[in-house]
Image (cartoon, rainbow, N blue to C red):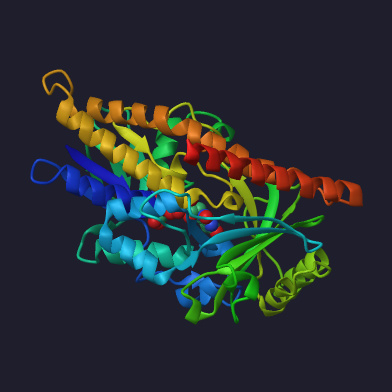
Amino acid sequence: MKIIIIGAGFSGVSTYLLLRRMLPPPEHTITLYDAHDPRAVRLRSGRDGLASPEEATRDSAATVGNIISLEPPAVRLLRFIDHKLYDTFKARSYVNRHYTLRSARGHTLAVIPTADGKLPAEHTLSCPRFDSWQWLHEHVGYDDSVCYRRATEVDLARGRPVVHFADGSRDDADLVVGADGVRSVVKKALFGHEDESSYGPAFEGFLGVGGFVDMDLPTSVTDLESMVFTFGPAGSFGYCSAAAPEQRRVAWWSNWGSPNAPAGNTVLEASTIKEQLLDRHATWRDAAINDIIQCSSTDRVYPVWTTPDLPHWGQRGSVLLGDAAHTLQATSGSGANQALEDAVVFSLLLSHYMTTSDGARHVPRDVADMASKALYEIRAPRVAELRLRSRNLYVTNKRINSVVLEYLWYLWIFVQTHVSFASKFLSFMC
Ligand SMILES: Cc1cc2nc3c(=O)[nH]c(=O)nc-3n(C[C@H](O)[C@H](O)[C@H](O)COP(=O)(O)OP(=O)(O)OC[C@H]3O[C@@H](n4cnc5c(N)ncnc54)[C@H](O)[C@@H]3O)c2cc1C
């Protein structure tokens, strides 16, 4: 089988590593394409023009993303995908043993262990999104394993999918894997004839700012080795360590409700963003929040969006994985986890159908379609549930002006977190 993977993020690199092992050459060929070479990327930080990635990751969640958190199931999948990749993530990330949920008034609403009781024991890892992307590329290797070309169009109308690239070249395959993120060209080939609102990103009613600051890790992080989430009448504020403790690198994010859906990221004066942060959070009881705001200098506001549930994740020799199939809210912290789950499930399904299907009756493209269909049946309900769970934590996108309603909201968060923790605990015990 000839396979093209578009996108070398979590889903694309994992699928590449797994399929290379499960469907080895020369019978099978797998080519991985990505639009961006991390060695050449110079990211825009603030309005000062181009800056080094290192500078940009310090400061601008809106352009390069903020923290990626990998929960225990995803960490175990990393180990299954590739031991060395797992070692890299473990060594360079912060290991969070707890999630602490607080109210703006200083109550601890929940302290939830990140370990899920399964073996091998793992905890939630946190690292900058941009760094994780670099590690994935580093791991695959810069020895021509990734072809750095931007796919512009995928033609699924013929017997064999054809991919067209920005440099005028083209490639064809039995299977095209769309691991190319939220603006996927493969998704466009599958659904582009429909109204974009049926498959494109949809605003969730929340905006966010965030970034990284260099400072001593707050004791609320180090005491329990915790990610800290605080909820209040004007939104929410989260922070955690973004790297191994000696690096003193704190990631932070603030989300609040908004009726308006901006077209994309909004650039403001950094001082304006700081004023808005202080307006929302200055009276909150956690002193670390104020310290972080004082050190922050981001100038971008980003919208929180998701993509709607799709009727399928691939046909006619194509499959969508990760964000291309389902973009979850940034506030869910689940995007990378779900991308890894897709990659593993799809790779296992494809290699299973390749070895069990009747070659006389099934051409490779049909086998790929069987795997895409099974992937959707297994994974789509789980993703839909995660989207709903994330929405439930952010029950209102309006500023709460009544103390009674504020306390009712804290009660809601308390119940939500304890019910889901209790049900996890019970299913573990059974
Ligand atoms: C700007 C941004 C910020 C984010 N911030 C956070 C965050 O703070 N926390 C969090 O948990 N999640 C965040 N996410 C989501 C998280 O990064 C994803 O859920 C996760 O990385 C999904 O992995 P993926 O492999 O499906 O897609 P991605 O990681 O998006 O990877 C897609 C890959 O495809 C490549 N690509 C895209 N288009 C093309 C093309 N036409 N041709 C060739 N290659 C292409 C890209 O260069 C990229 O390498 C963010 C996503 C974005 C886009």
Look at the image and tell me whether residue 191 can be seen. yes
**Residue sitting at x 57%, y 38%:** 423
User: Is residue 261 visible from the viewing direction of this image?
Assistant: no
User: Which quadrant would residue 66 be assigned to in this image?
Assistant: bottom right
- Quarter of the picture holding the N terminus: top left
**61 relative to 25, above or below:** below
Q: Residue at x 76, y 67 (%)?
A: 277
Which one is in front, 352 or 407? 407
Left of 70 or right of it: where is 83?
Answer: left
Q: Residue at 48% across / 72% down in the picture?
A: 243
The one of 2 and 345 positioned closer to us in this rendering: 345
Along the viewing direction, whichever of 83 and 30 lies nearer the viewer: 83
x, y percentage for residue 214? 58, 80
* Residue 306 percent across, percent down from the top left: 58, 43
Image coordinates of residue 303 in percent, x first then y, are: 65, 52
In the depicted view, which residue is nearer to us: 121 or 18? 121
